[in-house]
Amino acid sequence: MLYIQSSMNEQYDNAELDITLIEQSKTGNETAFETIVDRYRRRVLTYCHRMVRHESLAEDLAQEVFVRFYQALPRIDTRKAVVSYLFRIAHNRCLDWLRTRRPQMQTLTRTEDDDQPTVQLPDARPTPEEEVLRGELLEAVEKALAAVPPRYRSVLVMRHVEELSYEEIAEALGLPMGTVKARIHRGREKLQQELRDFVNL
Amino acid sequence: MRVRCSRFRRWSRFAIDGELSAKEREAFERHRLVCGDCRVEFERLLRAVNLLARLPSVESGASFTANVMARVNRARQAQGEEARRKASWVTVTMVVAASACVVVGWSEWMLPAIVSTMSDGLVMLVKGSRVLGPSLTLIGALSALLRAFFETALTLGRSGASYALYVYVLTLTIILIAASLTRNARRRYGASMLCV
Ligand SMILES: [Zn+2]
């Protein structure tokens, strides 16, 4: 019996294609690199958006993630998952931003984003739950997530939104598996507290 | 297996991740059925996680990939300029070092050896720093110089050795400065990559 419903379980884990694309990119093949960007941009952007909760800023951060990934290509080990590299860079960038620049941006974030839930993907099949989740509830979850401290939020998004494995998260963060699990566990509790009005039925 | 509330709560995180053994899972489920408090608590946690998992993904603007490539190219241009600056600096160093040799009145037949030693070292510094990293390159360059010094000393005898030592120290200083500059440039530029 599986407790967690999956939402983004698409055919992203085509590891062999990734290896080919990385190897081609390493030799300067820009089209190959563009394909990598196309394959992962939605995931990286979603992660950044969940972290900073600001549309244009998230897009800017996500683009930067790929630029840095490009610059790191010579040192990329194709045996490791691409997502681990991408989310490592994304995690560092978002936490960096939250640490250093959030105070100035806070007003902007509030006015632009709070009344406006994120864009729903056109190809997502709406289930009854998603209909309910739209609007108020969706916004509530976004707000609750934003209230979770960044280092917990990051692993929560990686695990339950991006559906990374524990191994991939541990690799991305350079942390032991036990630490990652404990952090995710702690993050879930914090999220549950933030969502208490919605889960305490 | 009997499970008490405390153990049930400890196990709930493993249950969510599907990490309980079949036997543990069975005991977990049994307690879940009979204990209302634990059931409610576990369901709250589940609901929170499931709400999170149902958050939609965010679609990027149409020009996302094009923008990334534009930024990549901009960064690459900046990198090229950095390399050119580095290269021109090395050229200047070599010219200065060679002039220094002339200034100290080095005998004509020694000059080529010294210059070629220095250029060996510096060429290695430039080329090698890409492949080997600065510290290994530096060691290579220094050992090339050291070898040249001993060869000169052996050929010229004592008076030649003191001259050679002088030029060696001079060149060493220059190479050290060049290396530290190269490394600084690398650090500045490479800082963004350290996160990988
Ligand atoms: Zn109980």
Image (cartoon, coloured by chain):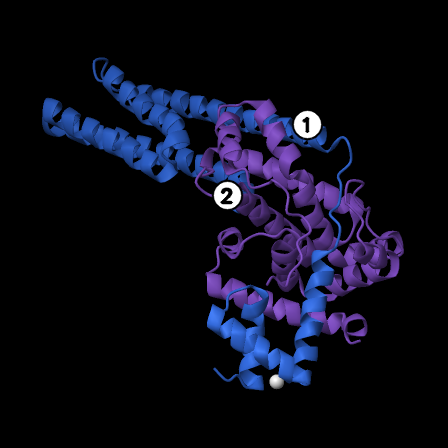
Chain colours: A purple, B blue
* Amino acid type, callout 2: Ala
Q: Count of labels shown? A: 2
Q: Chain under label 2?
A: A
Residue at screen point 25% across, 20% down: B106
Q: Are marks 1 and 2 in contact (CB under 8 Å)?
A: no
* Residue A172 rendering spot, x and y as whole percentages: 52, 51
Give the quadrant of residue B148.
top left
Q: Residues within 10 Å of mark 2 (few under 14, many from 20)?
A: some
* Residue B187 rendering spot, x and y as whole percentages: 49, 41
Residue at screen point 23% across, 18% down: B113
* Residue A200 rendering spot, x and y as whole percentages: 77, 76
Q: Residues within 10 Å of mark 1 (few under 14, many from 20)?
A: few
Q: Nearer the viewer, residue A175 or A131?
A: A131
- Residue A148, can we see it? no
User: Under tag 1, what secondary structure?
Assistant: helix
Q: Is residue B192 above or below residue B9?
A: above
Q: Which residue is mark 1?
A: B70
Q: Which residue is mark 2?
A: A81
- The residues tagged by marks 1 and 2 sit, at their Cα atoms, a distance apart of 25 Å
Q: Chain under label 1?
A: B
